[in-house]
Amino acid sequence: MGTILIKNAKVVNEGRIAQQEVLIQGEKIVAVESKITNFPLETKIIDGTGKYLLPGVIDDQVHFREPGLTHKADIETESRAAVAGGITSFIEMPNTVPQATTQELLEDKFKIAAKSSYANYSFMFGGTNDNLEELLKTDPKNVAAIKLFLGSSTGNMLVDNEAVLEQIFSSTKMLIAVHCEDETTIKNNLAMTKLIHGEDIPMELHPQIRSEEACYLSSSKAIKLAKKTGARLHVFHLSTAKETNLFTNKIPLEEKQITAEVCIHHLWFDDRDYAKKGALIKWNPAVKTKEDKEALWKALLDDRLDVIATDHAPHTLDEKLQVYTKSASGGPLVQHALLAMLAAVDQGKITLEKMVEKMCHNPAKIFKIEDRGFIQPGYFADLVLVDTHKPQTVTKENILYKCGWSPFEGTTFNATVTQTFVNGNLIYDQGKFNDQIKGKRLIFNRV
């Protein structure tokens, strides 16, 4: 591992864009200056002329399907797609097979990632109705968070015992990340809809079954419990206008005890897209109305919502293209998430600086990730060079996901990720991968 100097790029960091040079030695950034003249003779020079240099994206919610569901995806394939899309660190969910609901099973996932992940990684411990003792063994410096499914769970991961929920919220100082949808409301909505349509429910009714009320009931309940117990709560994938009013922008992010995430698909698609995309945009929570999408954008920009993530959740096309009641919910996004947000920058929906705040800086702050998320001396050199004047069209031939499809297929983005650095290593370079070097386990600055 040597020295790399990135020259002539426009560096986007901490609310400003400036023409700067970045010097990397080993794994870390050692200098960020307008002109760097003192560097070793053997330094590798990378010319960033005409490009933006961003901190590597930190995706706080992915499902990479390993172990147990590797016909859909695995840590190697999806982390490879992630670094091609400018994501240098990810936090993965516990609903694999087996589920990561014991410390031993959780560590098994870390061992897999150490051998196969192109990006930096952490995993969440999965809470259930009956594993509190095991949950409390979770090491806050080495594990990203506790994940609770308050709806839409797999296996036994639906935490629906209110006494257990309060006990978990009261007992751990770990960040608790939650999926919020009220299961009773959804079941009632589904039963009523099946009386009319049977199993073959029109896909555009998905947001009426997994409704605004189902989301709001669950998320408001979680927030009420967090306020009662003082728990540190992070609410995943907000999808409704109504829910955005549960969150505040009155205090700095660092002081928030309750934070929230919005995902790419809820910012990009709305219910008008079901006619064309059908099951390919079936997610839980559902993609909802144009008005919901606009409200999510508003809350993101005014800082009620703190993070942009993917909820990357691949399934095979066979699993997706079933009748409604059998069609799997979720889709692959890590390769194209940054490109989609750069398109939003082009459209004037968000500034480049704000995008970097929500995709790079804020995840690092919320999870207290050690020395990542910023372009600063002393930080790990997780960096992305993007050419915003190099269009690319998403086709089956250039999709890197193991499942082989994307909801963005046929979309032309104006930008291209040209290089991705992970821990100072050039892992992705204009379509070519360094397969010899793997990412590192994320460490967290917590007591």
Image: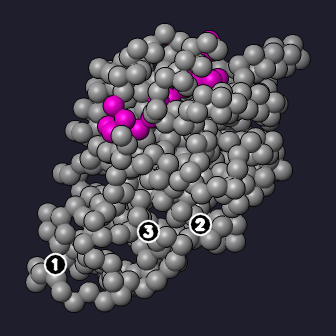
Q: Secondary structure at mark 2?
A: helix
Q: Is residue 66 left or right of residue 228?
A: left
Q: Position of residue 203 (x, y in %)?
A: 76, 32
**Is disc 3 surrounded by few (<14), some (14 to 19) or many (20+) residues within 10 Å?**
many
Which numbered disc, 1 or 3, marks the residue that appears first in the sequence?
1
User: In this orientation, does residue 70 appear?
Assistant: no
Q: Is residue 331 left or right of residue 111?
A: right
Q: Residue at x 38, y 69 (%)?
A: 375
Residue 169, located in which quarter of the rendered image? top right
User: In this orientation, does residue 305 appear?
Assistant: yes
Q: Residue at x 81, y 15 (%)?
A: 188
- Quadrant of the rendering where the C terminus is positioned: top left
The amino acid sitting under disc 3 is: Leu
Residue 382 image label = none
> Would residue 157 be counted in the magenta stretch?
yes
Instruction: Please tell me whether mark 1 or mark 2 is closer to you in this view.
Output: 2
Residue 354 image label = 2
Separation of marks 1 and 2 at Cα, in angstroms = 32 Å
- Quadrant of the rendering where the N terminus is positioned: bottom left
Residue topped by disc 3: 54
Do callouts 2 and 3 mark residues in contact (Cβ within 8 Å)? no
Q: Position of residue 427 (x, y in %)?
A: 28, 59
Which numbered disc, 2 or 3, marks the residue that appears first in the sequence?
3
Instruction: Please tell me whether mark 2 or mark 3 is closer to you in this view.
Output: 2
